[in-house]
Amino acid sequence: MGKKGAMPDFKTIDDYIANQPEKAQEKLKELRKIIREAAPDAVEVLNYKVPSFKLVPDGKSNQQIMMAAYARFISFYPFPTTMAKFSDELKEYKQGKGSVQFPLDKPLPRELIIRMVKFRREEILSKDNENSL
């Protein structure tokens, strides 16, 4: 976020983005567009006060991907299994267990993000199909 104090209670993803520094706004808008391209049916929600995308209808929090702005980067949270699957391609980025940091001063890896979103969506759908058998 880059701002000190309690995190504001945003009402919409647009509200969240509008309240970020200009460089972060640009990257968040770009990442949102990439996610929407990869998963056009994703439902946008705020979860944990950050922009989230339900990849399947009525997706629970572990069936969502998220993004958040910070002072020098935006974080993308595609889920730990997705991070593991694409670990070789993400080596140049700082990572957490289920997240990757994209610096504000570098281009987003568009094609990689699309493949990550599609992978996570298919993973969720295949697990849902297994559970319904």
Image: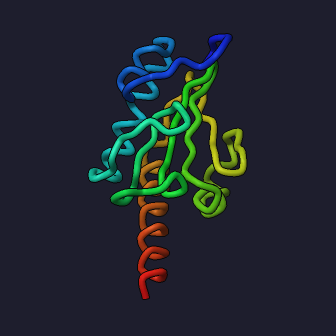
Placement of 124 over or under 78, stated as above or below: below
Residue 126 in the image: state x and y as whole percent.
45, 76
**At 48% from the left edge and 56% from the top edge, which residue is drawn?**
60
Residue 63 in the image: state x and y as whole percent.
49, 57
Q: Quadrant of the N terminus?
A: top right
Placement of 44 over or under 128, stated as above or below: above
Name the residue at the left extreme. 41
Picture quadrant of residue 52 = top left
Q: Quadrant of the C terminus?
A: bottom left
Say left or right for 28 vs 89: left
**At 48% from the left edge and 61% from the top edge, which residue is drawn?**
120
Residue 35 in the image: state x and y as whole percent.
38, 45
**At 72% from the left edge and 45% from the top edge, which residue is drawn?**
96
Residue 39 in the image: state x and y as whole percent.
33, 53
Q: How is the image coloured?
A: rainbow
Say left or right for 132 vs 96: left
**At 42% from the left edge and 22% from the top edge, which residue is drawn?**
17
Say left or right for 22 vs 62: left
The residue lying toward the viewer, choosing from 12 and 124, is 12
User: How many labels were placed on the picture?
Assistant: 0
